[in-house]
Amino acid sequence: MADPKRLRPRKTPRQQRSADTVERILQAAARVFVEHGYAAGTTNRIAEAANLSIGSLYQYFPNKDAILIQLVRRHIDDGTAAIGKILERPLPDTLEAKLDLFIAAAIDAHRGDPRLHRVIFEESPRPPALLAELHALHDTAVGHLAAMLDIPRLTAWFVITTIESLTHRYIGDHPEPDYPAFHTELRTMLTTYLEHTAAAVPSRCDDPRLTPRRATEGAGAGTGSQDHGRPGAGVSR
Amino acid sequence: MADPKRLRPRKTPRQQRSADTVERILQAAARVFVEHGYAAGTTNRIAEAANLSIGSLYQYFPNKDAILIQLVRRHIDDGTAAIGKILERPLPDTLEAKLDLFIAAAIDAHRGDPRLHRVIFEESPRPPALLAELHALHDTAVGHLAAMLDIPRLTAWFVITTIESLTHRYIGDHPEPDYPAFHTELRTMLTTYLEHTAAAVPSRCDDPRLTPRRATEGAGAGTGSQDHGRPGAGVSR
DNA sequence: GACGATAATGAGTGATTACTCGCGTTTCTA
DNA sequence: TAGAAACGCGAGTAATCACTCATTATCGTC
C-alpha cells in the first residue's frame, strides 16, 4: 500500500530554480521554528516566510515532519563530520588538548543558532529512526573518547554528556557568551576529574563509601540506545 | 476589560468533591502530557483521562496552558522546598557531604517522573513569568552554593548546572538508572573540580579578581544569570 | 517560437482543536 | 425537606491546521 507517511522529498529538483526553492524552504523553516517553536511553526507560515506558496512547499516535502527531519539530518551530518575531523588528524599528546577537540566541536555545533538547536533537540517529535541516529552519534563520541583516553565507558559518558549539556545550557543561559572562558573552565573541570579517575587513588577521601565505583560496565553508557520506546511521543496527527 | 488570558483557576473549589476534581485533572494532565507530549495532549484527552467531561475541566482551568502552569508551579515549589530543607538543618562539614545534599535534591526532583520533567522543562511553552521563576530558582541554588562553599558564582553555576543537566540526561538516557553509582561518580567529578579550583586560588576567595558578581539581583526580567564575569581568571592553567 | 517538462500557485477540504453554554445533578444549609 | 449554591455534563462552535489539486507560469531544447 505504499508507505503511508513518507519523509523524503516527493520530487527531486531538476533545475537550479527548484533547488533554490528547497533551500529557501529549509532556511525559512529554521527561522520559523526558532521563532514560533515546532508546534506553532505551521507549514503555511514556513511557506510565507520563504515567499512561496504553500503548494510549492508540498511539491518537495510530503509533510511537515519531513522538513524538520531534513534539518536534523544536517545537524547529524555536521556532528559526524566534526568527529571525523578529530580522528583524521594525529591525536595530540596531552589530556587537555584531547579534551579541547571535543569541547571545540560541541561549541561549534551550538554556535550556529542555539535556538534552532533547542527546537530540534528538545521540542520536536523525532521519529525513532532519527532518535537512534542521534543516540548513535552520541555513542560514537563516547566510544572514541573512551578509546582515546583509555577510560571506562561510564566515565566517557560523563565527559561527553557534560560537554554537550553544559555547552547547551551555557549558551542558552548567557545571551552574550564568553566562549574562551567557558571553554577553559569546562576543560579544567574535566581534566581534574579525569586525572583523579586515572590516578584512581582515594586522594582525599579514604572513606570507602566515597571511592568512585569503577563503573560496572554496561550499566553505564552501554545501554545507550535502549530508547525506552516512548509510545506516542510524536505529535503527528 | 479583565485580563483576556487568565492563567489562574476561574472557579475556586468549595466542596471536597471539586477539590478532588481539580486534583484528578492535574494528575490526568500529567499522564497525558507524558504519553502524548504537550502539543498532542489535548484538553479533551485530559478530560477523558480524568473521567470527566470537558466542560468540568474548563470550570477550573481557563485554558490548556493554565493546567501545565499549575504542574510547573508544583515542581518549582518542590524545588524551593528542597533548597529550604537543605538550609534549615546545620550544614555538614565536608565538601562531599555538602555536594551530596544538592545532588540528592536533583535526583529526587527527577525521580518522580522523568518524562513529565522532560515535557515540562523542554517541550512546553512557558510564559516569561514562569521562566523567570525557574531561572530564579536556579540562581538561588547557585547563590547558596557559592556562599556555602565560598566560591565564585561561575564555579557555582558550573556545579549546579552540571548536577541538573547530568541528572536529567542520565535518567533520560538510562531506562534502569543506577542512582548510587551515578551519584558517586557525579560527586567525584565535582569534588575533584572544586578541590582543584580551591587549591588554585590562594586563600580561597580573598582574591579580588574572583569575587562573584552579585548579579544585579531582582532582574527577574533580565536573563537571570549574567555571571560570566572573568570566569577562568583563577583557574591558572 | 513551439512544445513538453518542470516549477509555482492558492483557494479549498476535511480533520482536529480549544473552548462555550444551557441544562441536569449533587451537596449544603436552614 | 425545600431552596440555593456548587458541581458536572457534552453536543456544539469558530478557528486553525496539514495537506490537495486543478490551473497557470517558466524553463530547456529543438
Image: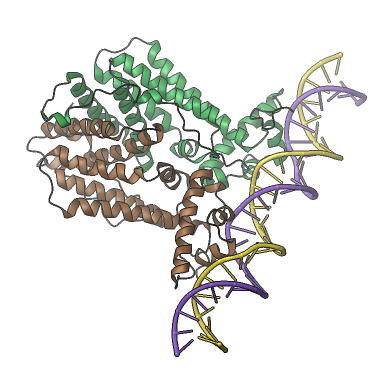
Chain colours: A green, B brown, C purple, D yellow
Closest to the observer: A180 or D11? Answer: D11
Residue B14 horizontal/vertical position (percent): 44, 73
User: At 54% across and 42% down in the image, what residue appears?
Assistant: A38
Q: How many marks?
A: 0
Q: Residue at x 53, y 67 (%)?
A: B59
Image quarter hosting the N terminus of chain A: top right
Q: Quadrant of the C terminus of chain A?
A: top right
On screen, residue A80 versus residue D30, left or right, reads left
> Whole-percent x and y of residue B92?
12, 45
- Inspect this view and state whether residue B222 appears: no
* In the image, farthest residue toward the left: B203
Where is A44 relative to B43, above or below?
Answer: above
Residue A15 in view? yes
The residue drawn where x is 45% and y is 28% is A226
Between A225 and A87, the residue placed more toward the observer is A225
Q: Quadrant of residue B152?
A: top left
Q: On the rendered structure, is B59 left or right of B182?
A: right
- Left or right of A133? Residue A184 is left
Residue A118 lies in quadrant: top left
Q: For the point 24% across and 43% down, which residue is it?
A: B102
- The x, y position of residue A190, in whole percent, is 25, 27
Instruction: Say whether residue B213 is left or right of residue B128.
Output: left
Q: Position of residue B31 (x, y in %)?
A: 48, 49
